[in-house]
Amino acid sequence: MRSRMAIMSSVRNALPRDRVVLITGASSGIGRATALAFAKDGARVVVASRNRASLDALAKEIGDSALAVTCDVRKREEVRAAVETGVRKFGALHVAIANAGFGIYHSAARMRDEDLEAVLRTNVYGAVYTIQEALPHLRKARGQAIFITSVLGKAVTPGGASYNMSKHALTAYADTLRMEEPKGGIDVIVVGPGQVATDFQKNAGNRFKDFLPARKNAGGWKPERVAKAILAASKRRKREVYLTFEGRALLAIRPLLPGLADRIVRKVSGPLHEENP
């Protein structure tokens, strides 16, 4: 039987079915699917990205429980405006999902300043801005800060140093925030997808003349399946969840047999080719 303390904690932190959820990077892929999943579950969603046309189409598909807000997460003032607009519309903010992100393929040895800046500005600064601006409202609601990181928040692949760095940084930030927040306050949740069938590769920058992951999306989970896992992690108040069998296997092997894990990843990724000047 659950203790009285555990039951009281669960009730205290229970979120309403019509909770208000902010999702960045919501115009496509995992973000779009997550907005649809939460809306179907009864949530009111604030969908944010730079692509206004796609946001409007998504909001129309969801209906009155959705609000589309144009937002570039690299700019704190736009993130703040998105949060404030959502709160004015719906009266509260219970969950903030920092999802916006992208990658650039390049070698670690020749990583360019502008590539590192671009990836960190979106993937790290954007997530930090999102959660920091939402935090006063999340604390008030005893809500949730959800970080969409990656299996690469705890592992690496060749050819993507800046992306690997950004996801490790995001995992560290989430872990630090969790430790600093008072017990019984907000939930800090990390969801790390593995390979997902989105346009990530298509939208990624690429410095190589020929590199398999940059040429072709090798498949993986559908965004809808990832969204279902994010929703489940929120409902169950999971500390962290890593997705796909291959991703979890890599994270299990790596601490015990790091050399073997590296060889497996190199084989899957393929050889690095010459970089464009």
Image (cartoon, helix red, strand yellow):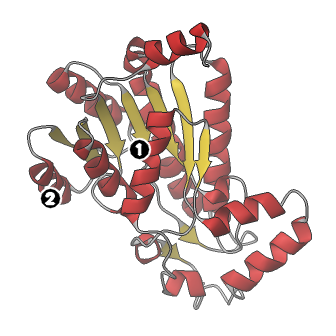
| Disc number for residue 231 | 1
Q: Nearer the viewer, residue 203 or 92?
A: 92
Q: Residue at x 16, y 40 (%)?
A: 66
Q: Which residue is nearer to you in this view: 209 or 149? A: 149
- The label nearer to you, 1 versus 2, is 1
Quick one: SS at disc 1? helix
**Mark 1 and mark 2 residues within 8 Å of each other at the beta carbon:** no
Viewer-closest of 266 and 132: 266
Above or below, comparing residue 8 to residue 146 in the picture: above
The residue shown at (13%, 57%) is 57
Q: Is residue 26 above or below residue 201?
A: above
Rendered image quadrant of residue 160: bottom right
Residue 142 position (above or below residue 67): above
- Looking at the rendered image, the quarter that the N terminus falls into is top right
48 vs 190, left or right, is left
Q: Position of residue 149 (x, y in %)?
A: 56, 50
Q: Is residue 62 left or right of residue 185?
A: left
Disc 1 versus disc 2: distance between alpha carbons? 25 Å
- Determine if residue 70 is in view: no
- Name the residue located 74 percent from the left edge and 76 percent from the top edge: 265
Neighbor class of circle 2 (other Cα within 10 Å; few <14, some 14-19, many 20+) is few
Say above or below: 198 vs 84: below
Residue 26: percent from left, percent from top = 31, 52
**Residue, disc 2:** 53
Locate residue 50, reporting x and y percent.
27, 52
